[in-house]
Amino acid sequence: MNNSKSKLRFSGKKTGVSITLPIGWHQESNENTNCATDIYYQSLGAPYSPCITVKIIEIPEAEYHQNNYQELSEILLAEQAQSSYSQTLEILEQRIENIDQHSARIDIFKMIDEETKIPVTQYQVTIQLATSVCGIVAVMKTEDQDFYLPVFNEALRSLKLTPN
């Protein structure tokens, strides 16, 4: 069996979202946030070593509508532009698709990290759920994007969104 094809199925301890990633990735739950969060990473410590953060953001009933995921995408893009050294993002791709039978938006963009001045590529996904939005953010150094973007695309197709 070819090791480069070996995958592991992770089940989100906090989010209930399961994802398939190549062997060598690890899972960590973040207790310090006010929403359910699971983090997947390849190696700890290195700045911008690839990681994927999955969050479930509950939407108050009065604010719930079918396009919460689109709103969240716009808010996240605006926040990222604020934290970019140049205050601008270079949008590489934006698309709407269905993920596990839920409406989803994918934004892929490049920016320069304000603190480290490292060019990074961010892969951001928002998925509309019944009472919440699932937000997924994957970050990598721009120099590594050709390797990791296919990994993130494949991981996205593997998602199973199980409501908690």
Image (cartoon, helix red, strand yellow):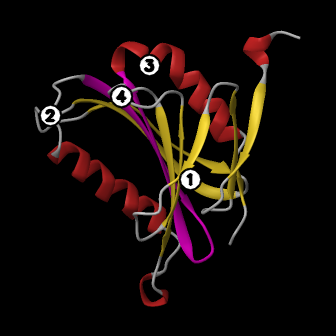
What residue is at 40 percent from the left and 63 percent from the top? 32
Q: Give me the C-alpha separation between circle 1 and circle 2.
A: 30 Å
Q: Which residue is mark 2?
A: 115
Q: Give me the C-alpha separation between circle 4 and circle 3.
A: 11 Å
Q: Residues within 10 Å of mark 4 (few under 14, many from 20)?
A: many
Q: Which residue is mark 3?
A: 145
Q: Which residue is mark 1?
A: 104
Q: Which residue is mark 4?
A: 48
Q: How many marks are shown on the rendered structure?
A: 4
Q: Quadrant of residue 129?
A: bottom right
Toward the left, the furthest residue is 86
Tell us which disc is closer to us: 1 or 2: 2
Left or right placement of residue 140 versus residue 22 in this view: left
What residue is at 39 percent from the left and 61 percent from the top? 72
Tell us which disc is closer to us: 2 or 3: 2
Q: Main secondary structure of the magenta part?
A: strand
- The quadrant of the picture occupied by the N terminus is top right
> Answer yes or no: do the residues labelled 2 and 3 have beta carbons within 8 Å?
no
Q: Position of residue 141 (x, y in %)?
A: 35, 22
Which of the marked residues, 4 or 3, is nearer the chain's N terminus? Answer: 4
Q: Residues within 10 Å of mark 2 (few under 14, many from 20)?
A: few
Magenta-colored stretch includes residue 122: yes
Q: Which residues are magenta?
A: 119-141
Three-letter residue code for mark 4: Tyr
Nearer to me, 62 or 155: 155
